[in-house]
Amino acid sequence: MIGRTISHYQISEKLGGGGMGVVYKARDLKLKRTVALKFLPPELTRDEEAKQRFIHEAQAASALDHVNVGYIHEIDEAEDGRLFIAMAYYAGETLKKKIARGPLPVAKALGYAVQIAQGLSKAHEVGIIHRDVKPANVMVTKEGVVKIVDFGLAKVAEQTQLTKRGTTLGTVAYMSPEQARGEEVDAQTDIWSLGVVLYEMLSGERPFRGDYEQAVIYSILNVDPKPVRTLRPEVPEVLGRVLARTLAKDAAARYTDANALLSDPRTLESQRALSVPAPEQKPVPSIAVLPFADMSPQRDQEYFCDGMAEEIINALTQVCDLHVVARTSAFSFKGQQIDVREIGRKLCVKAVLEGSVRKAGNRLRITAQLVNVADGYHVWSEKYDRQLDDVFAIQDEISLAIVEKLKLKLTSGEEARLVHKQTVNRAAHEAYLKGRYFWNQRGPGLKKSIQFFELALAEDNNYAAAHAGLADAYALLGFYGHLSPREVMPKAKKAAQRALEIDENLAEAHCSLGYIHTTFDWEWEKARREFQRALELNPNYGPARYWYSNLLMVEGRLEEAIAEVRRGAENDPLSVYMLAHLGLVLVTAHKYTEASEQLRKALELEPDFFTARSILGLAYYFQSRVEESIREIQKAIDSSDRHQFPMWTIGTVYAASGDRARAEEIVMELERRTQNEYIVETHIASIYALLGEKDQAFYWLEKAYEERAPVLCAVENGQPSWAFDSLRTDLRFRDLMRRIGLRDAD
């Protein structure tokens, strides 16, 4: 394998291997970075269960975004059919190698254990149980940062297991008693394994030993280990008690999960007693780029000002060691007179870029200032008096100046991507900026954006970003129900594919294609690959987080969906779209109180956001607050000129709460409106289903199938799946789900 190029990875050396894979160090030739490739062994390539477990590892680990969890870039297949996972490469060594040299210093051992617990806490939070925590699966970087790897045996809550009940998986010496007995396991099994690892770090030996596996299992089930303080007297007594609780044979006496262990006062006391140092992590520089102010004489350059800021944002996201706040949140302060320091605090960034544009004829005057949030002082400022043709060079100069002033080191690949321009045609670029300006306004602006994207392409048909913009515009027209999916989604797909033919590294186009594969093609694996590629290219791209979480929801993987949209919300904290979507996924997961909190946050930012208010009404209904539910949804109807989404929501609430007359009024209005506008067929079908009108419900579901309505893929697991419960035993429903690909053939 050494020296071979697999996909776009050039393999340089073997790092190690085990039963579920061989790991190599490699160079990513596209993104110019070092990675680790884990290959499924050749003898397991034809083993379907092994392949599924391997894929499961990538899925489980990719659902986590935490400093103490190894990062997964992608899963792919080599030419010989062997699956491989591309992972982040960390310079350092495994905990196994460290322990092999003898017991660790007590403070260092506890520090590593705390980091492992922090990573597991994140996994447990999203319903993932590792099931194979051991020193060989813990990397320690040169800076002392722990990275948990190898999620090959991970169990996702509520997900079908890959093995039958009674089968033991994992490394015997680190198995919990319930795991050794082949019973169902939960987060407490990881706590046990962590206790074994901590014991081994402190003493240099394992607590449960034997000459063969059954002897080890007998020891786990029946023998109490020596108290660690008899082997290592300098271990504080309070830490000994924490360790004893992690190794309680009765799971009921153990910590419930990693967060419970971390929050135990005795754990905190142990850390204070030993002065456990935090891992040596450099804080990640962070920045928000505000929309530039229009200082032109006619004040008619808003699209140009917004576009200037947006393109700088897109350029800066190419720098791996820089956290860039998403456009939606940064632009939420547009037109407001708020101190830059206050904006920085609200967005949790250390620096803010602001500027202005004065455009007169072919002349440009652009000012830019980089402000330190801590004290409000300028880190850097510059004024550019140039010709309009120099706009691309100005953007590059600003981006490179920011990187320099934030003291970031660029790789050659990052620098190339930072200044990469897709067109030098100024007319095409101006039309593209206008297209994005109207696209960001949503609603009627979508159709107008198409006109400008097409104008940009008429000037330069090889402008990949304009093709991607066209794909985004057509896709949203279908999603919001402005036009028939049959009419617009093929156009969106063609535009996205054309964008990728020109530039394969365009995150926006991969995201659009992922959305199309989800809602129109119903090809889940293709969709997943596109979303993961988009996030690999731009981890800060909010729409990819949004739509990927939607795919996970459609597949019934709700905890992973919640985790994904939370990541998007962390990077885009003031996005009402992200907060509303988080609320929707939480409602689907029956977490109504938390959903209500998120939706109220969205409405604090934008009181007339009818989507969030409609979902809030739905959350209230599920909390048996029917009157409040109807009041909220009615507000949404009034503020949206009777938009079909709140009309659907109130129709389902009326039907579900027994107000048949009002539900029938709503559904008849929606039916009448289909004569003059596109109404999503599942909206009508769900109300009929709740009214007990099964034949009518199936009539509209079939029309949704013919039209390939975007919400149809969600009727099994997403919203509005609850409305179709009365249809699930009907053979017609089963057949429909099979045709969509949400159920296997009987």
Image (cartoon, rainbow, N blue to C red):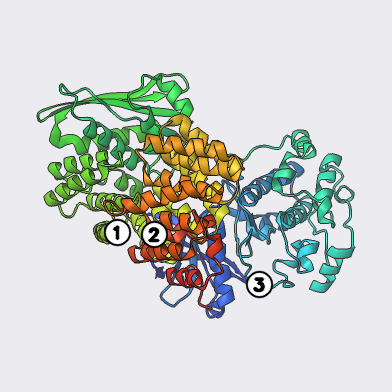
Mark 1 neighbour density, 10 Å: few (under 14) some (14–19) many (20 or more): many
**Disc 3 or 1, which lies upstream in sequence?**
3
Q: Which numbered circle lies on residue 163?
A: 3
Q: Residue at 66% x, 49% y: name it.
A: 116
* Amino acid at pointer 1: Met
Residue indicated by mark 1: 489
Label 2 element class:
helix
Q: Residue at 21% x, 48% y: name it.
A: 450
* Amino acid at pointer 2: Thr
Mark 3 and 1 residues: CB-CB less than 8 Å, in contact? no
Label 3 element class:
loop
Left or right, 273 with respect to 97, comes to right
Mark 2 and 1 residues: CB-CB less than 8 Å, in contact? yes
Total of numbered circles in the picture? 3
| Position of 268 relative to 726 (above/below) | above
Q: Which numbered circle lies on residue 519?
A: 2
Mark 2 neighbour density, 10 Å: few (under 14) some (14–19) many (20 or more): many
Mark 2 and 3 residues: CB-CB less than 8 Å, in contact? no
